[in-house]
């Protein structure tokens, strides 16, 4: 069955369907991600990328089909090896009413179903994770005063502190400055070389192009393209609309373009 | 000189009065326990949850009276707090259910609870043959009427609240800061959510005697807001809020021993005034903190 039978699958989705509200948001999704792969999920706004990654890690209930993580059915929450999975959501809007230092947010990445309190002496781990993201000196600052790029680095540190085998990261390039993008690309490259499986939701490959070994494109809740990343990016799609209505298909991507179907 | 003597005499009389001793014990317990849950609620932007639960607690008080009367109890008043505990827990679970389903917004659910709770309370008290006057003690607090049983009940529930709120702090912080990430970490999110709701309800039930249901949320939230002016970390915010809560409760209660004001109103005004004062001088505090930090950083570099 498996097209990647040589390497065990980290993620295996079979005929996944997700309904939100009245209709299906995802239909007939079959996806296997072998260990060590760096996969990009591409597609327009509203194509179902975020819903798919959430379904893959059990955050969104399936209407039908099945998802396995490391060979365990994700609906059996207790037996999923959570410490092996690191999730970086699209930036959480942090409000001034919240009290949290970078250190505290990152420390919450140490908790799992088996561990409701961090081990004593975990402070060093937290410091190291923040230092890795270039935020060592800001450990005790309030995260809501951080810039977009810095907030995102905190969330990445939170996911990486548990040294996951699978990193799922949602739209990491949106709304952050160029320096942060370059730094992020380097960090992900390092993880990839160390053997971490990476699934990254993207609007465009951009800085992450060298990292990506496989690009899966979604349109209207279905996989329409699955293969090596497109050879050339179309002219910089500067006209993409982050506010486009859900369901609108944005054509800035080579969804059906030349150079993809090879 | 005589004024000073009089003050110390009154203070001495206050400390040896058994009634006042009981009231002070309850004030300390409630004052330190309420902001623990308040810190989580502020983090979740559910600062008004305590108010919603408080209104339902009022219906619970009336149900307690009715049940007591039906059971032929001589002291229906003793049934009020257990009734409030039950109704608060039920109300909190209902809000949590609506919130987690996400089908209708949490603030609409809260509004329904507010109005349903207060109207239900007034109707049921009428049915029990009471008057709105009976309710006043619960609306504005009646700490001067507490007995020994109240102290034990409050101590037990406060221990439970502190146990959950402090013992599970890392997990509850993770939940309140980013529920989705907590779920993606495999944390038992549903159980933790229910724990927050239930401890919030118990906090309301025990705070009711001190400040009354109308001001119950003030005791949970205002000390947290004050602490947030002074510190940024979650852990310190909670610790500071606990200290502030206990202090304003004891101070406010003591004031009412000298002047017959409503304890709930004095306690709340003290904390709100403290907030106003600190917010006004905050720029100054920030400058000092910044200088201290810079000094420490410079020292570290040397």
Image (cartoon, rainbow, N blue to C red):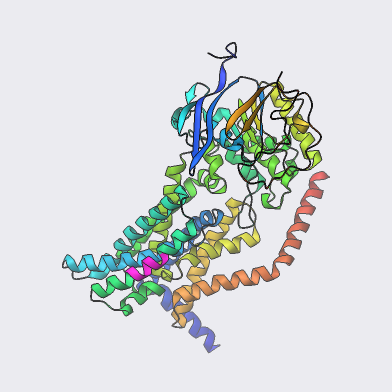
Total numbered circles = 0
Residue drawn at x 60%, y 71% as measured from the top left: B274
Q: In what quadrant of the picture does the C terminus of chain A appear?
A: top right
Q: Which residue is outermost to the left?
A: B72
Q: Position of residue B48 (x, y in %)?
A: 49, 62
Which residue is more in the foreground, B62 or B149?
Answer: B62
Which residue is more in the foreground, A205 or A115?
Answer: A205
Q: Which residue is outermost to the top?
A: A6
> Is B60 displayed left or right of B160 in the figure?
left
- Asked whether residue B167 appears in the rendered view, the answer is yes
> Is A237 displayed left or right of A200 in the figure?
right
Q: Quadrant of residue B144?
A: bottom left
Q: Which residue is outermost to the bottom?
A: B2
- Asked whether residue A161 appears in the rendered view, the answer is no
Q: Which residue is outermost to the right?
A: B302
Instruction: Report the magenta residues as a range.
Output: B114-120
Main SS of the magenta segment? Answer: helix
In the displayed structure, would residue B110 be above or below residue B252?
above
Q: Position of residue A15 (x, y in %)?
A: 50, 26
Residue drawn at x 77%, y 30% as measured from the top left: A186
In the displayed structure, would residue B70 be above or below residue B170?
below
- Quick check: is B289 in the magenta stretch? no
In the displayed structure, would residue A208 be above or below residue B279?
above
Q: Quadrant of residue B80?
A: bottom left
> Is B206 displayed left or right of A95 in the figure?
left
Q: Position of residue A58 (x, y in %)?
A: 51, 34
Which residue is more in the foreground, A104 or B182?
Answer: B182
Q: Quadrant of residue B82?
A: bottom left
């Amino acid at each position: 069955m498996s097209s990647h039978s040589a390497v065990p699958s980290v993620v295996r989705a079979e005929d996944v369907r997700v309904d939100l509200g009245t209709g299906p948001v995802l239909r007939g999704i079959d996806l296997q991600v072998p260990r060590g792969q760096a996969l990009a999920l591409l597609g327009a706004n509203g194509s179902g990328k975020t819903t798919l990654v959430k379904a893959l890690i059990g955050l969104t209930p399936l209407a039908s089909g099945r998802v396995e993580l490391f060979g365990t059915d994700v609906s059996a929450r207790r037996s999923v090896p959570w410490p092996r999975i690191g999730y970086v959501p699209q930036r959480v809007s942090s409000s001034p009413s919240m009290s949290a230092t970078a250190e505290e947010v990152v420390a919450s990445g140490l908790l799992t179903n088996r561990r409701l309190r961090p081990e004593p002496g975990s402070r060093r781990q937290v410091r190291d994770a923040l230092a890795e993201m270039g935020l060592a000196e800001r450990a005790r600052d309030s995260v809501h005063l951080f810039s977009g790029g810095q907030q995102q680095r905190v969330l990445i540190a939170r996911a990486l502190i548990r040294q996951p085998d699978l990193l799922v990261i949602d739209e990491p390039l949106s709304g952050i400055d160029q320096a942060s993008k370059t730094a992020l690309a380097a960090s992900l490259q390092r993880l990839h070389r160390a053997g971490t499986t990476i699934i990254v939701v993207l609007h465009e490959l951009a800085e992450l192009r060298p990292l990506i070994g496989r690009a899966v494109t979604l349109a209207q809740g279905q996989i329409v393209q699955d293969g090596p990343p497109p050879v050339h990016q179309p002219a910089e799609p500067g006209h993409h609309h982050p506010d486009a209505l859900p369901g609108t298909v944005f054509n800035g991507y080579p969804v059906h373009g030349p150079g993809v179907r090879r | 000189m005589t004024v000073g003597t009089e003050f110390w005499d009154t203070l001495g009389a206050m400390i040896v009065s058994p009634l006042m001793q009981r009231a002070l014990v309850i004030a300390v317990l409630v004052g330190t326990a309420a902001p623990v849950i308040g810190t989580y609620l502020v983090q979740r932007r559910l600062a008004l949850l305590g108010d919603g639960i408080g209104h339902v607690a009022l219906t619970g008080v009336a149900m307690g009276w009715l049940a007591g009367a039906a059971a032929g109890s001589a002291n229906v008043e003793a049934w009020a707090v257990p009734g409030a505990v039950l109704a608060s827990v039920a109300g909190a679970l209902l809000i949590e259910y609506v919130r987690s389903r996400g089908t209708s917004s949490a603030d609409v659910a809260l509004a329904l609870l507010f109005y349903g709770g207060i109207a239900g309370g007034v109707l049921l008290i009428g049915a029990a043959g009471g008057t709105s006057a009976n309710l006043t003690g619960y609306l504005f607090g009646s700490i001067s009427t507490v007995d020994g049983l109240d102290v034990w009940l409050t101590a037990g529930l406060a221990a439970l609240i502190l146990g959950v709120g402090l013992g599970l702090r890392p997990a509850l912080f993770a939940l309140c800061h980013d529920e989705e990430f907590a779920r993606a970490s495999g944390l038992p999110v549903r159980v933790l959510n229910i724990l927050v709701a239930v401890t919030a309800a118990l906090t309301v039930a025990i705070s009711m005697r001190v400040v009354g249901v109308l001001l119950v949320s003030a005791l949970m939230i205002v000390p947290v807001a004050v602490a947030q002016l002074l510190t940024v970390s979650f852990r310190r915010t909670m610790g500071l809020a606990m200290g502030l809560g206990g202090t304003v409760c004891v101070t406010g209660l003591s004031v009412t021993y000298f002047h017959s004001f409503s304890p709930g109103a004095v306690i709340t005004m003290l904390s709100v005034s403290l907030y106003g004062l600190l917010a006004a001088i905050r720029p100054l505090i920030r400058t000092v903190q910044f200088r201290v930090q810079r000094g420490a950083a410079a020292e570290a570099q040397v």
